[in-house]
Amino acid sequence: MPTPLPAPYLVAVSPSAAQLLKLSPDQVADSLDILVGNAVPEQGQPLAAVYSGHQFGVWAGQLGDGRAILFGAAATDNGPLELQWKGAGQTPYSRMGDGRAVLRSSIREFLCSEAMHGLGIPTSRALSIAGSSQGVMRETVETAAVVVRMAPSFVRFGSFEHWYYRKQNEQLKVLADYVIDHFYPDLRASDNPYQGLLAEVTRRTAHMVAQWQSVGFMHGVMNTDNMSILGLTIDYGPFGFMEAFDADHICNHTDQQGRYSYANQPQVGHWNCYALAQALLPLIGEPEDAQAALDVYQPAFAARLDELLHAKLGLTQLDAHADADRALFDAMFAVMQANGVDFTLFFRRLGGLKAADASGDEPLRDLFIDRPAFDAWAGQYRQRLQAEHSVDADRQLAMNQINPKYVLRNYLAQVAIDKAQQQDYSEVAKLLAILQHPYDEQPEHDHYAALPPDWASHLEVSCSS
């Protein structure tokens, strides 16, 4: 059961998430006691799930919902959505923790969940944040908050690992059958539904990570207990969006070895699928059948990322120039890396480049210290555009639909957090509204798409974030 919080107050509601439940923001706000966990909805049956997992590549044993409590599911047009409190108090799996979340981390999770949805990336959703003045001890004393988050299921890779490593194959089968019957029912007709489950989860994971890479998103803590069996982005902690491009960038201050760097995310996604395969092996049967399912990952990731990169550069002919395009992409990332070019601004401004001449290059060119290096790459890019007779206006329109103008930069989240800690929640609402339409120009909010200020480079997020 949730542990009540004194004098709760509402911080924010996502109108988009509320709409999934056929509720208005005001109707959600009227249920404040439920949002904060001070009351359980009628017919609600709160529970915390057990799972285990590999953390930073090391087997960590039993984990579980240490500060998350599932309190029910709501019918929607696309099937049931589970509703979960995050930060509503201790559970049997809190592991010496207080089961609470703080306002700072709750704002980050709320905003990024909805920002990722706005970007079109599979994710859990966030319905609301509610806060309280009750103190919570982290590095300093902070105030408590609760996020209500939603997903069709919060079952994780680690949910399967738990029963496998306990050698409880009967429970393992119950869980696998539940997931197949509820979320992958077409697999029932296959010769080996459990192999099919692994293959489908592997494919979804590969596609999700490719989408992360395409917008410069870094999860920060890709432990197997943070990997969704549905291929959703879940458990927003020390995440970050790439700013000055560095393929080896580590967004999680806790990750001293860089296991979860931007460049490593694709291979870690694959590694995590291997961990899931190991857990499912008693059900799949033969190791070669599990390997066949895992072999889906690399081609699925490569094909999806290739498709996304072509779209980000406004290129429509994917196969005719395959080898040359790979070289063009590699050269692009190399010059971005050498110049520390802002990831989001580069791709957004790239849409304004003209195929026939360099007269409009300045906004993009100014992102580079080494202008001649940019000019050389831009020349190659122009040749490629001309080879497929690209039309500038049409290409820019298409590119602006896949290259966001607005992402949740750490400093933007920090500004909203600083204001919220002074009881001003207006910036949370404003950021939410902007980030739900990241591809729109929104000229009145241009400054939210600018280069980050100097102080932003000193921000750090960690597993406590």
Image: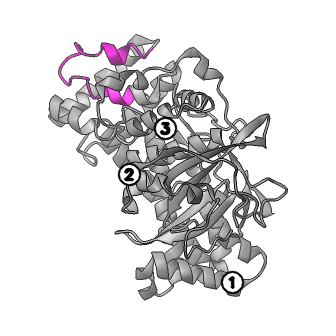
Query: Which residue is disc 3 drawn over?
Result: 216
Q: Is residue 51 left or right of residue 447?
A: right
Q: Is residue 461 above or below residue 121?
A: above
* Residue for point 71% across, 70% down: 50
Q: Which numbered circle lies on residue 16? A: 2
Looking at the rendered image, the disc whose residue lies closer to the viewer, 3 or 1, is: 1
Dot 2 or dot 3: first in sequence order is 2
Q: Secondary structure at mark 1?
A: helix
User: What residue is rendered at 31% in x and 13% in y?
Assistant: 362
* Nearer to the camera, 160 or 190: 160
Q: Could you tell me which residue is drawn at 50 percent across and 79 percent down? A: 180
Image-based side of 177 in relation to 462, left or right = left
Can residue 375 be seen in this snapshot? no
Q: Secondary structure at mark 3?
A: loop
Mark drawn on residue 280: none
Q: Is residue 355 magenta?
A: yes
Kind of residue at disc 3: Gly
Residue 163 in picture, x, y percent from top left: 72, 77
The x, y position of residue 234, in whole percent, is: 56, 55
Q: What is the CA distance from the residue labelled 3 to the residue labelled 1?
A: 38 Å
Q: Which residues are magenta?
A: 346-368
Helix, strand or loop under label 2: helix
Give how far apart the Cα atoms at labels 1 and 2 are.
Answer: 37 Å
Mark 3 surroundings within 10 Å by alpha-carbon count, few (fewer than 14), some (14 through 19), many (20 or more): some
Which amino acid is tagged 2? Ser
Q: Quadrant of the N terminus?
A: bottom right
The overriding secondary structure of the stretch rendered in magenta is: loop
Please give the residue where the numbered disc 1 appears in the rendered image: 171
Q: Describe the colour scheme in one phrase.
A: one colour
Q: Are discs 1 and 2 less than 8 Å apart at CB?
A: no
Label 1 vs label 2, nearer the camera: 2
